């Protein structure tokens, strides 16, 4: 464990061990912080990402620094982060501070210059985001909101929105979410259990209905409202 502490020099193996420990330590830290930290970075997430990256980088590049201090510091920051997240769920004023309400950039086809200034983005960025959403005319936009995570939500005027089956009074089938039951030639037993079927039934379906060998299947899914199996083979 000498590599864990400050050293005059480290061998290649000791550098590797530092990297391995740091990797799994960060993996655990991210798991504790939750899925929110993996999505669009908000204020708290951005601060944590900068701090953790900077703190853990030093012992990974300087043998004169031990890892203990960095790991303790990160542990304290994670606790503070969890406290802040809890406060943001319980305290409305704090929530508005770390996750402010969205504000308009476009309303009824008109650009709000004050909104652009508040978001600190130039008009070119707004136009880029419009192109990404395949919106070629600003006047088609009923509302564009700058979200607290740095993204823009666009809402088109009703006459420019895509028609839905409900608008056309068409009957549709209920939504069916495909369940992955085979992946890379191996059965996912947890997913198969959700379908109410067993391994024998699945193998029989693959063998008799599809005339296939399990090992030749890249992916197989099953609709949650019927027994139809969709098979994708290795190409």
Image (cartoon, rainbow, N blue to C red):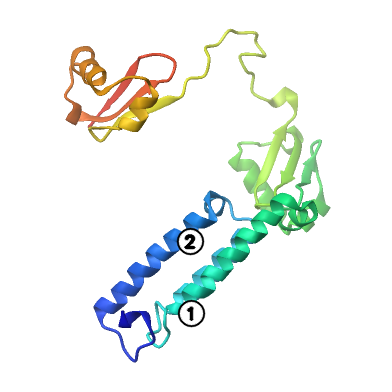
Label 1 residue SS: helix
Q: Position of residue 109 (x, y in %)?
A: 79, 37
Residue at left offset 19%, top offset 27%:
214
Q: Is residue 207 above or below residue 50?
A: above
Task: Give whichever of 86, 18 is nearer the camera.
Answer: 86
Task: Give whichever of 177, 87 is nearer the camera.
Answer: 87
Q: Position of residue 45 (x, y in %)?
A: 60, 59
Residue designated by label 2: 29
Residue designated by label 1: 69
Residue at left offset 33%, top offset 68%:
20
Residue at left offset 38%, top offset 63%:
24
Q: Position of residue 48 (x, y in %)?
A: 58, 65
Residue at left offset 75%, top offset 29%:
157
Q: Position of residue 228 (x, y in %)?
A: 35, 15
Q: Quadrant of residue 82?
A: bottom right
Q: Earlier in the sequence, mark 2 or mark 1?
A: 2
The answer, for residue 148, to whether it is visible in the render is yes
Count residues near mark 1 (Cα–Cα under 10 Å), then give few for <14, some for 14-19, many for 20+: some
């Amino acid at each position: 464990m000498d590599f864990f502490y400050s050293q005059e020099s480290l061998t290649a193996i000791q550098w590797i061990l530092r990297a391995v420990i740091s990797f799994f330590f960060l993996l655990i830290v991210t798991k504790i912080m939750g899925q929110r930290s993996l999505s669009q970075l908000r204020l708290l997430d951005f601060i944590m990402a900068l701090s953790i990256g900077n703190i853990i980088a030093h012992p990974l590049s300087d043998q004169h620094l031990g890892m203990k201090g960095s790991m303790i510091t990160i542990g304290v920051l994670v606790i503070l982060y969890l406290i802040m997240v809890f406060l943001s769920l319980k305290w409305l004023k704090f929530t508005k501070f770390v996750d402010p309400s969205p504000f308009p950039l476009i309303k009824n086809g008109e650009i709000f210059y004050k909104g652009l200034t508040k978001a600190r983005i130039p008009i070119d960025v707004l136009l880029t985001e419009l192109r990404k959403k395949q919106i070629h005319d600003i006047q088609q936009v009923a509302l564009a909101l700058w979200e607290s995570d740095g993204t823009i939500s666009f809402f088109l005027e009703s006459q420019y929105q895509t028609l839905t089956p409900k608008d056309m009074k068409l009957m549709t089938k209920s939504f069916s979410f495909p369940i992955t039951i085979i992946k890379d030639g191996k059965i996912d037993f947890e997913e198969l259990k959700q379908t109410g079927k067993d391994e024998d039934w699945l193998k029989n379906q693959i063998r008799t209905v599809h005339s296939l060998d399990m090992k030749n299947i890249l992916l197989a899914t099953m609709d949650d409202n019927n027994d139809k199996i969709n098979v994708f083979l290795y190409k």
